Image (cartoon, rainbow, N blue to C red):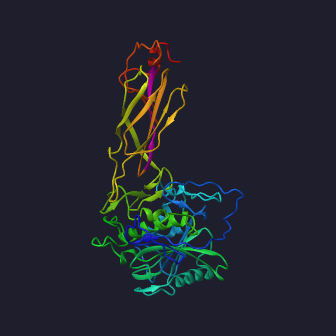
């Protein structure tokens, strides 16, 4: 559920079985599903654990499809579908439609691929927008009165009955309304909620997963209370701000519908689902063309979307799993060749991002570094844990004649960057006098070998006594 306020670290559980993003940021749980894609295994498969979020045995969605239901007498968003029509998702010309048609395959959605279940499923980096229904029948009042879940469920079932939409067990049905329509009584404490029900006739004995999205601008952000359903402490990009506000909520609810489909899979001890942990936390932002703030592009669209919790590397809020163009371009340490064994200090002295990394309103997100040292097969390799914000590390250099390779891989909230390798010649034998000196190691990266020092590696090898093979 999308809480109206940040909710990080807040606790609390409610009794009703829904997946709500509320002011307290908690999520409610419900009974198990019994759908065709869930299959029992004799030996449950292992899942990632120990990253700040817990697995509770339920399923994730192995295939993700969405249907948008616009329940209003007029188009809710600019260029949205005409009321009374249905069509494929590709014909939805609103910003909501553009986002849903281009969300699949993004670095951002890749964060959710770190979630799996013990049925053998992993959340894919793929979302298919299969169709929309602009329903103008039985449109609820937009006067703030509560529209109960049962009313929403009956409306969805009527779409199955009429053929306006088709039932599919791996489709998430998203319901949008206009004005002050108070879907599920979410206002004033919530912004969106994913839930489920079992159909009696349409569909008979089948579980339907749906999300309610009351109109976000009806609950604008209030700086004095730090609450609201539009951007917190930022401004949405100027291109259709109403739809932009909703896009942030859609990202949140899709993530949770994927990795906590049955409300019994992934959530914390406090009941927070993956997106709840990072609610209203955008990470590093930039000025969007035309005004407002953004933190990524989806297709050609600049958007402002909260981060999601990655279920790897001890867990953190992240905007993606890869950081194109991010690399370490210099480290400092001993000169090469190294003629004396011992512990040497290496420091990351230059990166392609600011030394302290980007930051956001909650916590500084300093880059983390992971290093690996190999010793030419003479000694076993060494690998460090991820070192948050640390730029210095120690490597024990053992006696011998070999090439030592230090590989450094950076990580920040946008994702993992490219690994860079520095090669050091080690000559610490009894006849280890050097006939060639070098002041810098050789650096390799994903583009090939770069000679930083005065001589290539092959010449340095020949300078060892005895020569390095």
Does residue 335 sit above or below 281 in this rendering? above
Horizontal arrangement in the rendering, residue 331 relative to residue 308 (left or right) = left
Q: Is residue 136 visible from the viewing direction of this image?
A: yes
Q: From the top left corner, tell me how far across and down residue 328 is, in percent.
A: 39, 39
Q: Quadrant of residue 67?
A: bottom right
Q: Is residue 76 magenta?
A: no
Does residue 340 sit above or below 333 in this rendering? above
The answer to which of 227 and 344 lies nearer the viewer is 344
Q: Quadrant of residue 190?
A: bottom left
The answer to which of 13 and 3 lies nearer the viewer is 13
Q: From the top left corner, tell me how far across and down residue 302 is, in percent.
A: 38, 60
> Which residue extends farthest right?
42
Does residue 383 sit above or below 312 in this rendering? above
The answer to which of 418 and 335 lies nearer the viewer is 335
Q: From the top left corner, tell me how far across and down residue 226 is, in percent.
A: 31, 70
Count the marks: 0
Q: Is residue 166 visible from the viewing direction of this image?
A: no
Q: Is residue 422 magenta?
A: yes
Q: Which residues are magenta?
A: 415-427
Magenta stretch secondary structure, dominant: strand
Q: Quadrant of residue 228?
A: bottom left
Q: From the top left corner, tell me how far across and down residue 185 is, in percent.
A: 45, 82
The answer to which of 459 and 313 lies nearer the viewer is 313
């Amino acid at each position: 559920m999308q809480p109206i306020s940040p909710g990080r670290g807040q606790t609390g559980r409610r009794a009703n079985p829904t997946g709500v993003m509320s002011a307290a940021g908690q999520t409610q749980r419900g009974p198990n599903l019994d759908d065709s894609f869930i299959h029992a295994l004799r030996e449950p498969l292992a899942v990632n654990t120990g990253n700040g979020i817990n697995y509770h045995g339920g399923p994730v969605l192995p295939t993700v499809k969405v249907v948008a239901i616009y329940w209003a007498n007029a188009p809710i968003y600019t260029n949205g579908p005409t009321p009374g029509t249905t069509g494929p998702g590709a014909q939805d010309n609103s910003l909501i439609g553009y986002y849903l048609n281009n969300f699949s395959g993004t670095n951002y959605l890749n964060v959710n691929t770190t979630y799996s279940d013990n049925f053998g499923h992993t959340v894919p980096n793929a979302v298919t927008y299969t169709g929309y229904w602009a329903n103008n029948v039985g449109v609820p009042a937009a006067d703030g009165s509560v529209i109960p879940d049962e009313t929403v469920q009956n409306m969805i079932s009527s779409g199955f009955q009429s053929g306006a939409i088709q039932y599919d067990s791996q489709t998430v049905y998203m319901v949008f309304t206009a004005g002050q329509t108070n879907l599920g009584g979410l206002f004033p404490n919530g912004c969106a909620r994913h839930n489920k029900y079992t159909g009696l006739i349409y569909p008979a004995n089948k579980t339907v997963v749906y999300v309610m999205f009351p109109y976000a601008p009806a609950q604008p952000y209030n700086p004095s209370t730090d609450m609201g359903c539009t951007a917190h402490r930022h401004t949405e990009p100027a291109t259709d701000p109403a739809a932009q506000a909703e896009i942030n909520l859609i990202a949140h609810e899709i993530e949770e519908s994927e990795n906590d489909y049955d409300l019994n899979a992934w959530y914390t001890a406090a009941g927070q689902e993956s997106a709840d942990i990072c609610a209203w936390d955008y990470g590093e932002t930039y000025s969007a063309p035309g005004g407002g703030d953004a933190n990524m592009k989806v297709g050609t669209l600049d958007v402002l979307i909260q981060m999601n919790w990655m279920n790897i590397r001890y867990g953190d809020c992240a905007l993606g799993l890869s950081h194109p163009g991010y690399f370490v371009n210099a480290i400092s340490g001993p000169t090469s060749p190294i003629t004396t064994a011992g512990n040497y200090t290496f420091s990351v002295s230059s990166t392609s991002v600011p030394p302290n990394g980007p930051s956001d309103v909650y916590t500084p997100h300093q880059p983390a570094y992971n290093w690996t040292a190999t010793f030419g097969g003479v000694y076993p390799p060494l690998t460090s844990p991820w070192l948050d914000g640390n730029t210095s590390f120690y490597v024990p250099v053992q006696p011998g004649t070999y090439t030592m390779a230090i590989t450094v891989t950076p990580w920040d909230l946008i994702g993992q960057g490219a690994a860079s390798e520095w090669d050091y010649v080690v000559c610490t034998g009894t006849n280890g006098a050097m006939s060639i000196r070098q002041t810098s190691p050789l650096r390799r990266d994903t583009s090939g070998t770069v000679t930083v020092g005065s001589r290539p590696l092959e010449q340095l090898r020949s300078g060892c006594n005895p020569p390095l093979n």
